[in-house]
Image (cartoon, rainbow, N blue to C red):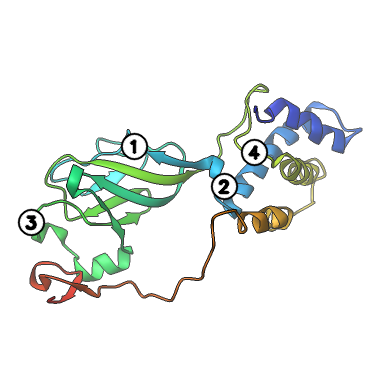
Amino acid sequence: MANTTFGELKRLVLQRLAPRSDGQTLLAVEQAINEAQKNIARVKDFDELMVLDTTHASTTADQKLYHIEDVGTYHFDLVRPKDIYTIRLMDEGNSRKLTYVSPREIDEKVPYTEIFSTGRPKWYTRRGKYIELFRIPDDTYSLYIMHSQWPTVLSSDTTEIPYDDLDDVIVTLASDIALSIVEEGVVGNWFERAKQLLGIVLREEETRPDIFYVAQPFSARGGVFAGEYWNNPFIKHQP
């Protein structure tokens, strides 16, 4: 089933702003629809903008920092990345999910990662637009990255929006934003407005069939691992 197009959304929003129909109003509506989509993405990562990238990202021997987009020599080439959910290092039987650690934790425990020998990475941290791997890779490994995306900026009337069944939310939110643009001085908190409009949708997401959400116990994460503690800063004791 095809999603609603940008042109159809513009028509629906303009109907709500009637009798305004000049060029300034049309530009305001186009801007408002794109802002509405972005604010919805800020509230929640919907399935339509969740991606499992299995083709772009890989490591390079002796390289620890990688830009998450297409910048520079070492990059993962992710498309409009927002939040990273998981990174898997693929090496046949030695494949593993990399464990996230905060920049503060890795800086405290391994301020100079180069003192350790290279190897198959097990941990990663995110520094702005960069991913840092530890250990520093000793070879080329494919990485499978599950991440959310920012919605693409709509410009062509024939382009379909990425969201399923959120037309009413986008139209209502975009109408509010467009009105604030054409009527100068009107200010709104569009993130809060998006949360309000998505209230019922979010409750439905929490009651999906075959999924039971439970609260996770508090965890400080850090290092109750067993192993060669003298050779690994994230291990606290011998087995």
Q: Nearer the viewer, residue 204 or 139?
A: 204
Q: Nearer the viewer, mark 3 or mark 2?
A: 2
**Name of the residue lying farthest toward the right:** 19
**192 left or right of 93 in image:** right
Q: Residues within 10 Å of mark 3 (few under 14, many from 20)?
A: few
Report which quarter residue 193 is drawn in: bottom right
**Element at label 4:** loop
**Residue ID for mark 3:** 117
Residue 186 shows in this picture: yes
Residue 45 versus residue 12 in the image, above or below: below
**Residue ID for mark 4:** 164
**Element at label 1:** loop
**Name of the residue lying farthest toward the front:** 210
Q: Amino acid at mark 4?
A: Asp
User: Looking at the image, do the residues carrying marks 4 and 2 touch, with CB atoms under 8 Å apart?
Assistant: no
Report which quarter residue 135 is drawn in: bottom left
**Element at label 3:** loop
Q: Residues within 10 Å of mark 2 (few under 14, many from 20)?
A: some
Quadrant for the N terminus in the image: top right
In whole angstroms, how far apart are the C-alphas of marks 4 and 1? 24 Å
**Residue ID for mark 2:** 46
**Residue ID for mark 1:** 54
Question: Residue 223's spot in the image, x, y percent?
Answer: 25, 73
In whole angstroms, how far apart are the C-alphas of marks 4 and 3? 48 Å
Q: Earlier in the sequence, mark 4 or mark 3?
A: 3
**27 left or right of 72 in image:** right
